Amino acid sequence: MCGIAGFCDFSYQSDHLILKKMTNVLAHRGPDDKGYELYKLKNSSIGLGHRRLSILDLSHLGRQPMHTPDNKCHIIYNGEIYNFIEIQKNLVQDYGLTFKSQSDTEVILKAYACWGMDAVKKFRGMFAFVILDEIRNKLILCRDRTGIKPLYYYWHNDCLLFSSELKSFHKHPKFSKIIHKNGLNSFFKWGYIPAPHTIFEHTYKLLPGHYLELDLEKRSLKQIKYWDAIDSYLLPKLDISIDDAATELEKIFIKSFGYRMISDVPVGIFLSGGYDSATVAAILQKHHSKNIKTFTIGFDENEFNEAPHANKIARYLGCDHTQYICSPKDALEIIPTLPEIFDEPFGDSSAIPTILVSRMARKDVTVALSADGGDELFAGYTKYMTALKMWNIIQKLPKTIQKNIVKGMDYIPFDKIQSLFSLYNLKTRSQKIQQMLYANQIVDFMNISSQLFTENDIKQLLLFENKPIPTAFDDVRNISQRTDLINAMLGIDYQTYLPDDILVKVDRATMSVALEGRDPLLDHKILEFVAQLPSHFKHNNIDSKLLLKKIAHKYIPENLLARPKKGFSVPIHRWFRKELKSYFLHFLDQDRLKKQGLFNDKFVIALRDRYLAGNPENVGKLWQLLMFQMWMSRWL
């Protein structure tokens, strides 16, 4: 696991010093080694920089940038190709190649030299890499199928910048820090800025399952898709029983999980006590002789605390378990670091315990496995059934009644009702229902239900015109017409919420302490199989994760796992009225808001003061505002 950065400058104004600055700001991602190389080509200067966290082949032979023997092809790379040994054998047997190192970097480079970008279809893992191909006169940026590893790029004024994190771009004199206002709008909708957009103009996230090709002669960019999760959801469903599906899926699990244990350094597991992480821990512990190290974060507030459940499961499996209880004091220490760790506004408050568990794990291991993706694969979120119920109700209503409901809601005093009866978030929910009444696709329901600030909120909040930007939500709008609604929603989340929220959170949290995070449930072979299964294998009207539970109960007694889902959330609604109140008073100050000229200060102050006075306001909205204000204070 590493950090990569660099540039292609057609004006020849970028030098070795700039490259070192862009690369060294990523030292937290790779403290073990570094490399910088500048290439002066006939029409551009290209810099490739690398910070290394040594996981495979800890020797100097794994140093990057790495080159082909003819010195015509060069690579910088972040990630792990878990099946690299198999690919290496193939290259040795079929092409007679020899290898100097035992690193997967050399395998990627020589696989590309033999097969071109078709090589990426053979890779099983997580990756973001940049290849300079002097023979084809191309610069290629590539990102893994699910988007586990990040890759940003900036393209403006004959200059291409690229990096694992946005902070590298601030070190280049050609980077213009202009806020992308439509990206800011998206942040307040979802709590993250969906790919390919970012918070800055001319700056993008490379989409998962895509690679970017820069023709150095023509100075033209072309983006090419090589994999799409939706394609698997649109295939005919397999004619198979749920028992046979569980048997086949367990085999895929065993192989996929086993790949994630390949390492020359210690490996552990984040264990929450839920079905996803418990299944990962159970399968790996059964197939390993040593006690696997597991790590859990808990809270003093019982409704948020999963630590006791994780402890029971760890004891049953025989894991070497460590837990830590997160307090407001811990949060107070972590919150000031969030704008640095997440160098783009990011609103998921569970980043706090994720950073804390990463710090705890890093004391004992260099690699940690998490169980992200289980909810998106097996329909674990309650929002799926909520959206489905709302969809079915609204579809049965005549259009005239729908219009009357929308009009009638405008006259209901939701603020007063919410205050009188201590009803939480009533006005926001009513606004979402109004939006849903106009929706034509289940994807619109997913979109609306996922929003924190509604369209009406944003119109009141922002002082500039609200223009929606195209996202993966738009790309998959018609999926529900070609598969069932549950599978449609799972495909949508796999393309949006998973890579743009969950995987960003885990990557930045783990890499902030030079801990490699791996996601065994996100092996693309798992998605390709599970997507072809009927939705009733995953969810019915009573229960969720049916197929996963069938496998989990083979390893762990049901009574240890059966409990209400809590999720990895934090009690910020209590903390910010007490221990962390000063944050809201400082960063959501009226004078500060007026000077920025972005927000309706009266709207923000009213929301802040109602919450601090004890009213049942959605503190998540204030958290979003706080995260943006702290980010802006750090980076602009």
Image (cartoon, rainbow, N blue to C red):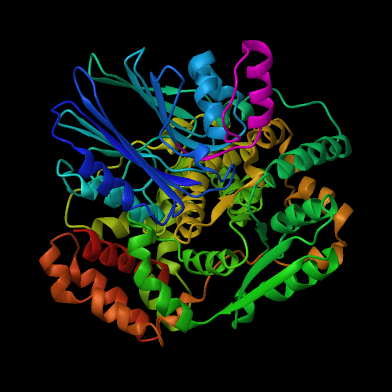
Q: Residue furthest left?
A: 595
- Horizontal relation, residue 11 to residue 104: left or right: left
**Which residues are the magenta region?**
77-103
Q: Is residue 93 visible?
A: yes
Vertical relation: 557 (above or below) 301 = above
Residue 281 at x, y percent in the picture: 75, 56
Vertical relation: 186 (above or below) 245 = below
Q: Residue 265 or 568: which is nearer the viewer? A: 265
Q: Quadrant of residue 272?
A: bottom right
Residue 190 at x, y percent in the picture: 40, 53
- Quarter placement of the C terminus: bottom left
- Please report the residue visible at 36 percent of the width from the left and 12 percent of the height from the top: 136
Q: Is residue 308 magenta?
A: no
- Horizontal relation, residue 106 to residue 165: left or right: right
Q: Residue 349 or 520: which is nearer the viewer? A: 520
- Please report the residue visible at 48 percent of the width from the left and 59 percent of the height from the top: 509
Q: How many marks?
A: 0
- Please report the residue visible at 12 percent of the width from the left and 68 percent of the height from the top: 594
- Please report the residue visible at 77 percent of the width from the left and 26 percent of the height from the top: 238
Q: Is residue 618 visible?
A: no
Q: Residue 213 or 83: which is nearer the viewer? A: 83
Q: Is residue 90 magenta?
A: yes
- Horizontal relation, residue 317 to residue 346: left or right: right
Q: Quadrant of residue 174?
A: top left
Vertical relation: 498 (above or below) 591 = above
Residue 597 at x, y percent in the picture: 13, 61
Q: Quadrant of residue 213?
A: top left
Residue 406 at x, y percent in the picture: 40, 53
